[in-house]
Image (spheres, rainbow, N blue to C red):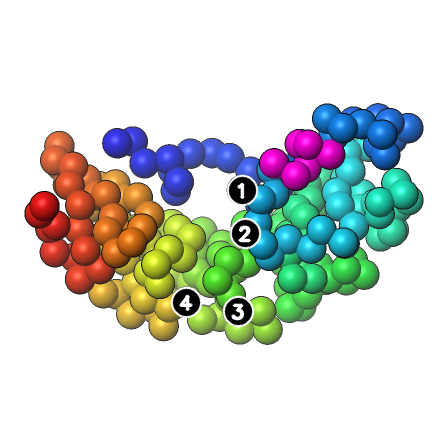
């Protein structure tokens, strides 16, 4: 199975829009890339979007190609419900549509909000915050996945399990690999065996 959702190195939530400023408004390719990369109901399509300058830094521009936030970032995401994730030389953090730092701090890693929570990494461990910046999942996990079907995959000591939105471990860490829950089922791997479990952690049989 080689679970990719939590293991692969990829820039989740970040949009790489690479096109010349003078062709920004007329390039159908640029619009297509932006639309296809962001098929998400939470995305604020009316907000400013990240644009890659020739300097290699990102700025936010409006539909007229005008810079609307007077700051540059190494990486930048689209806005979702008024919040974006950006990266400077050493940290990742959340900003509002005015470019102001949210929650009063920066993180080693930060992921876009999904289902009301954002994944953060501090001091080598992962947890989640809500939209007020309050930690709702303790920052104690080696790795943490996105919320799916009201469960969140978490890894500790090389094994995956699942917690509920309150942070309670509901399926013990006993799997070498996991996928996301869909329609109440999740594909998991234990040793060399791959199978499905339900939301109680029981093996599913057809």
Quarter of the image for the N terminus: give it. top left
| Mark 1 residue element | loop
Residue name at image x 60 percent, y 37 percent = 37
CB within 8 Å, label 4 to label 3: no
List the residue tagged with mark 1: 12
* First-in-chain label (4 vs 3): 3
Check if residue 157 falls in the magenta segment: no
State how far apart marks 4 and 1 are (Cα): 20 Å
Q: List x then y, in percent, for residue 121.
A: 49, 54
Task: Tell me the magenta residue range.
Answer: 31-36
Please give the residue where the numbered disc 4 appears in the rendered image: 137
Task: Give me the C-alpha separation between circle 3 and circle 1.
Answer: 18 Å
Separation (CA) of disc 4 from disc 3: 9 Å
Q: Which marked residue is nearer to the observer: mark 4 or mark 1?
A: 1
Sequence-first tag of 4 and 1 = 1
- Which structural element holds mark 4? strand
Residue 27 occupies quadrant: top right
**Label drawn at residue 111:** 2
Instruction: From the image, give the main secondary structure of the stretch colored magenta.
Output: helix
Mark 3–mark 1 contact, CB under 8 Å? no
Label whose residue precedes the other's in the sequence (3 or 1)? 1
Secondary structure state at the residue bearing disc 3: loop
Note whether residue 75 is visible. Answer: yes
Q: Which residue is mark 3?
A: 130
In front: 66, or 125?
Answer: 66
Picture coordinates of residue 92, whole percent (x, y): 62, 50
The quadrant where residue 113 appears: bottom right
Relative vertical location of residue 103 with respect to residue 185 in this rendering, above or below:
below
- Using the image, determine if residue 93 lies above or below residue 168: above
């Amino acid at each position: 199975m080689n679970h990719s959702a939590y293991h692969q190195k990829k820039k989740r939530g970040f949009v790489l829009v690479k096109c010349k400023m003078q062709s920004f408004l007329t390039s159908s390719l640029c619009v297509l890339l932006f639309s296809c990369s962001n098929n998400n109901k939470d995305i604020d399509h009316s907000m400013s979007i990240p644009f890659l300058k020739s300097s290699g830094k990102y700025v936010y521009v409006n539909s007229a190609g005008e810079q609307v936030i007077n700051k540059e970032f190494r990486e930048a995401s689209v806005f979702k419900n008024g919040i974006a994730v950006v990266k400077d030389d050493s940290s990742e953090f959340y900003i509002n549509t005015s470019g102001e730092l949210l929650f009063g701090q920066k993180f080693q890693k930060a992921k876009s909000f999904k289902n009301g929570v954002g994944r953060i990494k501090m001091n080598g461990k992962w947890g989640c915050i809500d939209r007020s910046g309050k930690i709702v999942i303790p920052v104690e996990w080696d790795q943490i996945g996105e919320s799916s079907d009201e469960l969140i995959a978490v890894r500790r000591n090389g094994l995956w399990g699942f917690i509920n939105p309150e942070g309670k471990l509901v399926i013990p860490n006993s799997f070498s690999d996991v996928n996301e829950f869909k329609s109440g089922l999740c594909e998991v791997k234990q040793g060399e065996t791959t199978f499905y479990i339900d939301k109680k952690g029981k093996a599913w049989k057809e």
